[in-house]
């Protein structure tokens, strides 16, 4: 089933999922099992909407909101409800939140979980319940190795992003002495490990800090970076701590370039660090710039939300549209929608989508970009090799 999810012609023509009338196809609609009625079903975004990791989650939730709004405009007699499930990015909250979604019989699919730690905590529950999930941003490679039939990933994993970050540090920055820091999270530690593999002996030392807003004083780490005489620092973690680390490095007179992954790739990092300290930071992402997404996505997003799309807004939009198209085609039980996603092949605004038997995207569709902080803004720098 090859599909095209791109909205074109300046927002006039709707996507393929909404073409062909307002009423939902009956399909499995006579079933009352797990949301089996044809209309009034739900999809959710699962991720941080409040708390220290909220900026990236809000980007994604806004992408889902746009997809659902467009769908409902085209299908006013058979709408789908968008639910925001706020995990605050915490693995501790994830199981209870997952169970809340599972217990809602109208809930047919999840965009998320957004982060790797909460994915590890919630994944087994979604798998047992048969509730399909498409994460637009959780990149830890081992998530695809758990045997969860409900797990799908709409971006590349850290086996693409980590090596690319290492290549950028080695070949573009020409760094000779690299200090690696991670926040001990499933995502941050895994990404840092992949960077270390590429850089080898160029890594002169490393350190671990606490994430999730648990640490604000990084003076011990700053001292270690100074002692290592590093000319580049890689950070695996999220933007709040990254911003504080960059600020404290700068305050200590350390000018080593900071490189970090997609968990830091947000304007909130610049706010945390301060524009002067953040200047020149390199941020990677297994994604293209959302503002360069296909069709009229960027304009439609800004018209709805009043700001340009951010990191993973476009991949979340695509993930939502895959679920919505399945519902439009009459897959209105969890079992049917899971089977739809498993066999899906189509074009979105961010990428082309086809999933392997572990739920990963086809490797040829994965891209990794470097972004750079310039004059207080995160701007595209260049696409970089994955290895």
Image: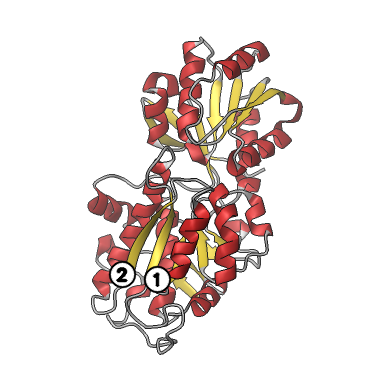
Q: Which of 121 and 134 is in front in this view?
A: 121
* Colouring of the image: secondary structure
Q: Which residue is drawn at 54% across and 25% down?
A: 258
In space, the residues marked 1 and 2 are separated at their CA atoms by: 7 Å
**Cβ–Cβ under 8 Å for marks 1 and 2:** yes
- The image quadrant that residue 325 belongs to is bottom left
Q: Which residue is drawn at 67% across and 64% down?
A: 147
What is the x, y in percent for residue 288? 47, 47
Q: Is the residue 10 above or below the residue 157 in the image?
A: below
Q: Which of 33 and 315 is in front in this view?
A: 33
Left or right for 88, reference 21: right
What is the x, y in percent for residue 63? 36, 55
Left or right for 13, reference 28: left
Which residue is identified by label 2? 71
Please tell me which of labels 1 and 2 falls first in the chain. Answer: 2
Q: Is the residue 170 above or below the residue 148 in the image?
A: above
Q: Is the residue 29 above or below the residue 92 in the image?
A: below
Q: What element carries label 2?
A: helix
Residue 349 in view: no
- Mark linked to residue 324: 1
Left or right for 41, reference 200: left
What is the x, y in percent for residue 272? 40, 27
What is the x, y in percent for residue 65? 32, 59
Q: Is the residue 208 above or below the residue 62 in the image?
A: above
């Amino acid at each position: 089933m090859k599909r095209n999810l791109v909205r074109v012609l300046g927002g006039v023509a709707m996507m393929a999922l909404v073409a062909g009338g307002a009423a939902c196809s009956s399909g499995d609609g006579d079933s009352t099992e797990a949301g089996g009625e044809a209309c009034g079903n739900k999809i959710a975004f699962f991720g941080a909407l409040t708390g220290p990791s909220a900026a990236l989650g809000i980007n994604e939730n806004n992408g889902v909101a746009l997809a659902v709004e467009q769908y409902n405009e085209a299908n006013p007699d058979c709408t789908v409800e968008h639910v925001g499930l706020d995990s605050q990015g915490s693995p501790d909250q994830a199981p209870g939140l997952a169970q809340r979604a599972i217990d809602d019989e109208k809930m047919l699919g999840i965009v998320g979980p957004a982060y790797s730690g909460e994915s590890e905590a919630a994944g087994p529950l979604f798998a047992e319940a048969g509730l399909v999930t498409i994460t637009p941003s959780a990149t830890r490679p081992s998530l695809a190795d758990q045997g969860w039939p409900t797990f799908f990933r709409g971006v590349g994993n850290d086996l693409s992003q980590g090596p690319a970050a290492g290549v950028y540090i080695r070949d573009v920055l020409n760094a000779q002495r690299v200090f690696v820091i991670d926040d001990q999270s499933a995502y941050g530690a895994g990404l840092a490990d992949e960077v270390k593999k590429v850089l080898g002996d160029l890594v002169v030392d490393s350190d671990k800090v606490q994430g999730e807003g648990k640490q604000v004083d990084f003076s011990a780490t700053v001292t270690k970076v100074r002692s290592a005489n590093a000319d580049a620092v890689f950070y695996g973690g999220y933007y709040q701590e990254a911003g504080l680390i960059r600020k404290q490095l700068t305050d200590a007179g350390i000018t080593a370039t900071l490189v970090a992954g997609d968990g830091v790739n947000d304007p909130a990092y610049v706010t945390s660090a301060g524009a002067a300290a953040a200047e020149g930071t390199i941020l990677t992402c297994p994604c293209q710039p959302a503002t360069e997404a296909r069709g009229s996505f960027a304009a439609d997003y800004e018209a709805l939300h009043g700001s340009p799309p951010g990191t993973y807004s476009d991949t979340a939009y695509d993930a939502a549209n895959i679920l919505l198209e399945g519902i439009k085609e009459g897959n209105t039980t969890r079992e049917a929608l899971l089977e739809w996603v498993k066999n899906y092949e189509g074009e979105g605004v961010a990428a082309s989508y086809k999933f392997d038997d572990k739920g990963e995207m086809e490797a040829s569709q994965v891209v990794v970009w470097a972004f750079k902080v310039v004059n207080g803004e995160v701007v595209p720098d260049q696409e970089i090799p994955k290895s």
